[in-house]
Image: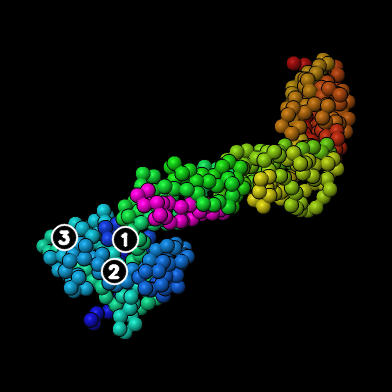
Amino acid sequence: MMRSKIAIGVLVVIAGTRMVEAAGFNDGNGKEWRQLPGTVGLSWNQVAQACPQDGATSCVGSVAGINLNDWVWGTDAQVLQLFGIFEPAVLTSPSVEGMAFFGTAQSFLSGLAFQPMSSFCETYFCGANASGWTASKDATDSPLVGSVGWGNTNVSFGGSFRIAAAASADATGPGVWLWRATGPGANAYDDAGQVASPDGGVAVADVLANDWVAGTPATTANVAISQVSSTDPGVGLDVGSGSVNVAAGTVAGTYTLSYRICDIANASSCDDATGTVVVNPYVVRAVNDAGWASPSTGGTAIANVLANDSLSGTRATPSNVSLSLVSLSPADAGITLDPAGSVNVAQGTPLGAYTLVYQICDRTDPANCAQATAAITVRNYFINAVNDSARASSKTGSTPIASVLANDSFEGARATTATVQLSQVSPPVRGITINVTTGAVSVAPKTSSGLYNIVYSICEIASPANCASATITLDLSGKL
């Protein structure tokens, strides 16, 4: 029978919604059909790489990230049989459309049966459609596509079921018509799951969820389940619930578990399947740090680079991660990384900015690592000398300034003679003295009246070149 060719494209809907893949559809005739939205994006030629076209042999492997394993690629005849469950007219004519098919097309794409690949509803019109590659080709070697759609406006409505040839086997608009046997007997299908970390947990809630026996979903009430093998003793099957569990402490990696189901009503009817379990590694997170130290004293620039690092949300410590130095630029022996996490600067290390790169690795999985950078600044202590002023009598002796250090600072703290050395920069002034031990400024009796500006300096005791200066202004205008 000749079939008209159709062009395949993705329907663009302004106010449409893209639906996610749901559970398959049991056609009651021994087949569970896969939802089309989960298979969109493959060309006929791509599917043919993994799936035989005989409508009986299962696909093997994945294509473009879509797992096709265990599914059978439906032929045009099989897809027509599926359509015929909803619309018998297609059994005599592979393409039907019109008002008479609106209800059956809507039922097919109701979501209770098959999810549409695209759907829309505007003020005056609504619609939905789905299409998929069949495993068949026509007499001209063009691949056949099975499609269903419906639409309505405020004055009309219609539906369609169609098997037609595609313009190109390389188009990627349709999904793929795939089915797997629900009977007779037991039919077990592969599963896949994962746990977040070696802490373990449930990887697969129930391996029976996609298995069948005699045309009905497999449960612990109608099948006996047993574990055949596991590639790791930490990955096991709970035969009571069907869950695949991962024991705490199982090393990160990919494992397989084989299981068997047998029909309780017919113990000789059994089938095996495999569960693939991924144990994800702990998440190692290293966060950049910054700190400083003075070359005059040296010291700890960063108390612990691990303080803001984590292992799967738990603070990183030397007990759960290993710490190592990756690089230091520019290289200098005065900057070191302690195994406990501190970054230390030796006394006398040259002034400058240094970049230290370190790495932390999960102790249970040494290949699972992360790196971060510690920015180290070697600088002098900040010294700030602030001007002072006072008014006093030139006739009588006094101490108008108790200490010039009172408003000076050393790295944010008040400067004292324990941290700085005080000295007078300006030439000596007769009658005015600065006590370099206490910082007091004294005026002797009968000092000449006038306005005096005296400059003093404070220098870091441990680094005499690190200094700051300020000015003392004294107004000696006579007797107060």
Q: Residue 406 in magenta?
A: no
Residue at the spot of label 3: 103
Dot 2: what SS?
A: helix
Marks 3, 2: nearer the viewer: 2
Q: Which residues are magenta?
A: 254-277
**Upstream in the sequence, badge 2 or badge 1?**
1
Which residue type carries mark 1?
Lys
Which residue type carries mark 2?
Gln
**Upstream in the sequence, badge 3 or badge 1?**
1
Residue at image coords 73%, 40%: 341
Q: Residue 257 in magenta?
A: yes
Is there CB contact under 8 Å for labels 2 and 1?
yes
Is there CB contact under 8 Å for labels 3 and 1?
no
Q: Position of residue 203 (x, y in %)?
A: 49, 47
Residue at image coords 67%, 40%: 320
The answer to whether 35 appears left or right of 70 in the picture is left
Task: Tell me which corner region of the image, top left, top right, bottom left or bottom right, holds residue 412.
Answer: top right
Check the picture and name the quadrant holding the C terminus: top right
Q: Nearer the viewer, residue 59 or 134?
A: 59
Residue at the spot of label 2: 78
Q: Position of residue 144 (x, y in %)?
A: 31, 75
